[in-house]
Amino acid sequence: KQWYQRRVAITPGFAPLPVTTRGQNFHINTDPKNEKLLYCSGPAVIVRDLKNPTECYTYTEHSAAPTAACFAPSGFYVCSGDMHGKVRVWDTTQETHIIKYEGQVLGGGIKDICWSPDSKRILVAGKGRDSRTHCFMWDTGTSCGSLHGHGKDVNAVAHSPARPYRAVTASEDFHCVFHTGVPYKYEKNITVHKNFVNSVRYSPTGASFCTVSSDRRALLHDGKTGELIGELKGEGGTAHNGGVMAVSYNLAGTQLMTASADKTVKLWDAETQELVTTFTLGKDVEHQQLGGLWAGDYLLSVAMSGNINYLDPNSGTITRTLKGHQKSIETMEVSGNKIVTASFEGRTTYWDSESGDAEYFTGAGHKNKVIDMKISNDTLITADIEQKVLRTSLSSSVMGDDTSTLPSQLSHIAAHADTGLEVYTCEKEILLFKNGAQISSTPVTYEPRGCAIAPSGTVLVVGAKEPKLYIYDIEGDTITQRQDLDLTAPLTEITFSPDGAWLGAGSTGRNPLLLNVTNSYKPTIHCWSAQSKLVSCHFSPDSRYLALGGVDSNIMVCDTTTPMDSPIKILRAHPLGTISRVRWLNNNTIVSTGSDMQVRQWTINA
């Protein structure tokens, strides 16, 4: 632990986006001070700073994917629930996030969570057979009443902000149930909606609560009795032209926002029930708004694409959009201060390493898993599982203008900026391209794996499943085999050091490969060892350090000048997923990506 803290420091990381599902609302929450944004994404609970979203941390202790989370009104604890119906109450004030309570509360996934205003009771809603709601004491798990009354999944639950305590649940059975407490008990059934009721939220004053539904309506009810007191209506006679997915009040309770699948967010006056502002956030399906939150000065909405929009209620404009990934990041490269990533569904994104701002590549991009990418000068070369190759100018970021199709499944790409060469290792053949056009195809008898071109541009190395390493001379438009080396395990990613003196590679075994190129590719004896398969490797710009990452979720930083010294290890760099790529941003900073959808940066104090 001391060694780790002394040699490595984590710098701003880029959190994943909410993982959304079309037609289902997505709940996001904030802390009592309205400074943090809380949501679930894949295997983790994400807590981001609203002012500076690169300041974030993740909670990764759930055994199943978390689906809902909520801060206690005290701000000291978070209750999060997962897809198996288990909740965990954990501390937010310490880095270790000590657990206070864990228990199985529902038989299915949890959809929403809320606390009583005194931070003593927790109410959960979701899926199950016998029970779809539960209320319990936060520290002991003791039941504090009954929230029964629904026949289908419960989408949301809300609690009054002050006494007398009231609780409302909203369900896919088209009903809301009004409860009194404590202990909580059934009071009445609210049957005014004609479709799924997606969300319910109380006004901060407790005077009213609002229910929103897929029937396009948003209804206001008395906070103490549950009686219907009004309806928010637009030009078409309903609140929106599509299902209403989320609702949230401002701090004063004078206005509320609604987010809809019609790709709009609307602001309403809570007293007059008149429309104040409409935000139109796009025209495509991915622009459907599935979540929303009014957190102090921040008005937020969540699109089906996962994008988090910051809205200005005064000007009616979008002031900022948080972008990123919703699925595992498969590959990554760096160019200057830019980081380029591509994910399982084909989304290609470039990030500013300092500000964390992200933008998507546009045009006819990939629609499936991106297997590998390389950057050659200003050109990004990407290839997907459908054997489609795209060459995209980094300055324009428009994909689809320059494409190629490979004859068989790709393993890896190698590129050389000075000569314009591109190498694609496919099934039983190696393809050589120059300036985007194929110039040769070399059949091979082995199954190629990783590949790399030497900085000189005259040597190509290719790993094989056997396991072996094949070394080729590049002569004009052809490649000629020079030698082959027997290995102890098949290689994964292969890389040359920038000065051409070293060849490094990850392997399916526990030990990385380090060859001295200037000494006829002689293996260098070292004491570096991982716990499992190494997936990615990369040399620092000064050629001194070799960074490796893999299945064990750790990053090793190996010093080539002292191969018998223990490497610097970044333990649990991506604790819930395989590390897909490691790259040096500069001589002191490593960028890593993984199946946890996160981009992280690490400063090495050598």
Image: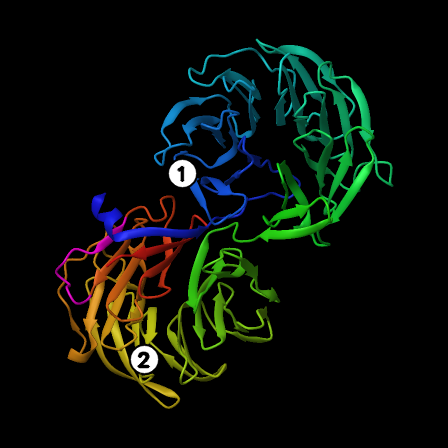
Secondary structure, magenta segment, majority class: loop
Callout 1 secondary element: loop
Total of numbered circles in the picture? 2
Q: Please tell me which of labels 1 and 2 falls first in the chain.
A: 1
Image height of 167 relative to 513, above or below: above
The answer to whether 297 appears left or right of 336 in the picture is right
Q: Residues within 10 Å of mark 1 (few under 14, many from 20)?
A: some
Q: Dividing the picture into quarters, in which one does residue 56 lie?
A: top left
Is any atom of residue 450 visible in this view?
A: yes
Mark 1: which amino acid?
Answer: Thr
Q: Secondary structure at mark 2?
A: loop
Q: Residue at x 42, y 50 (%)?
A: 595
Foreground of the two, 66 or 467: 66
Q: Which residues are magenta?
A: 560-570
Residue for point 36% across, 53% down: 579
Of 296 and 325, nearer the camera is 296
Q: Position of residue 237 (x, y in %)?
A: 87, 36
Quarter location, residue 372: bottom left
- The residue labelled by disc 2 is 455
